[in-house]
Amino acid sequence: MAMGRHRKTNRHLPQRVYMKHGAFYFVTHESKWIFLGKNYATAMHEWAKLVGQSQKVTHMADLFDRYMLEVAPSKAAQTYKDNQREIKPLRLFFGDMRPENVEPIHVYKYLDTRGKKAKVRANREKSLLSHIFSKAIEWGIVRDNPCKDVKRRTEKPRDRYVEDWELRTLVDGAPELIRHYVAFKYLTGLRQQDILNLRLDALQKDGIHVTTRKTGKRIIIEWNEDLRTVVDAIRSMRNIKSLHLFGTRKGQPYSADGFRSIWHRCMFKAIREGRVKQRFTEHDIRAKSGTDADASGLSAQELLGHEDAGTTRRYIRHKQAQKVTPLRKKY
């Protein structure tokens, strides 16, 4: 898409997309305003359908438009949503530059500037930028990826380990949905999106068949007595017809945002009542699952569905204290 006049406001939006009275609009060359929606994600989806195939790329803003139009929508739903959020600060910083003029020094400057407020997010955004340049090479727009030799900023690993008693006290006062969800997540170690999208036909005789959305890895979680008991309890609480193990009252799978709201309400209530002293995230339960599996001599890598053992080691090593053997007295 050809580069128009430089924006002074809302520079995170694609070319010819504007906000007006709390809604997003696409303005045609004939100055016709086309309503896209009030929600950013919905508006971007409508924009992609409206624009169709992208045109000539002259500036980074054009490259971002093409990537978000042709590549990002093919990713998993949550990844696509993350990309929509991550592209905003990238547009603000790089949008007016030409792709061929972006050098490693600019990427380092971005990490330094963005990292002052959000170091982890800066690393994620740099990863997205690197993939965008990889596609730009494929499209013949640039010859090199300026991100390839730029090192990520060091992140402090999250080392929150959820103790057994914390899970017990949380679920003691939690609604039935959270009680069963926590038990299922701990036993299986599955990611939230894989649990919320799990269909009933995945429950087969030899186990629960899952293709993880993040990595595409196929796993079969074998049945044991505890897992069967939890799944039976989940199915017994369902007074609705749904194709999903965890379905809403309308029979649909929970959205990530919807379930996050339920989880936050439950956690804040537990803290307010003094049942939990320090909040923990839903994702911390997956870390606890992998750590406990490792401590029990089971394969944490297989349980968590990691492709690489190094990923598993980085994932759990900060969640437990290392045991050491003391010396024996020799004098």
Image (cartoon, rainbow, N blue to C red):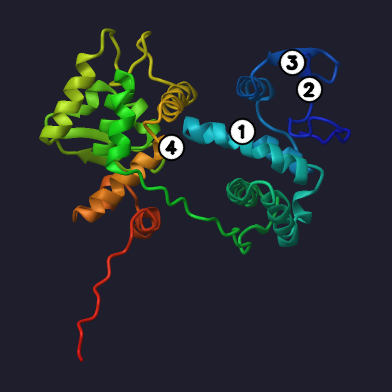
- Report the amino acid beneath label 4: Thr
Q: Dot 4, how many residues are within 10 Å of its Cα: few (below 14), some (14-19), or many (20+)?
A: few
The residue drawn where x is 33% and y is 38% is 166
The residue drawn where x is 41% and y is 24% is 266
Asked whether the residues under the numbered discs 3 and 1 touch, taking CB atoms below 8 Å apart as contact, a structural biologist would say no
Mark 3 vs mark 2, foreground winner is 3
Residues under labels 3 and 1: Cα distance? 18 Å
Residues under labels 4 and 3: Cα distance? 32 Å
Residue identifier under label 1: 84
Mark 1 vs mark 4, foreground winner is 4
Q: In the rendered structure, which disc, 3 or 1, sits on the residue that comes first in sequence? A: 3
Mark 3 vs mark 1, foreground winner is 3
Check residue 313 in the rendering and tell me which mark sits there, or answer none.
none
Residue identifier under label 2: 18
Residue identifier under label 4: 281
Q: Is residue 296 above or below residue 225?
A: below
Q: Is residue 136 left or right of residue 32?
A: left
Q: In the rendered structure, which disc, 1 or 4, sits on the residue that comes first in sequence? A: 1
Q: Is residue 56 left or right of residue 200?
A: right
Check residue 22 in the rendering and tell me which mark sits there, or answer none.
3
Q: Is residue 192 above or below residue 42?
A: below
- Report the amino acid beneath label 3: Gly
Q: Is residue 101 left or right of residue 299?
A: right
Q: Dot 1, how many residues are within 10 Å of its Cα: few (below 14), some (14-19), or many (20+)?
A: some
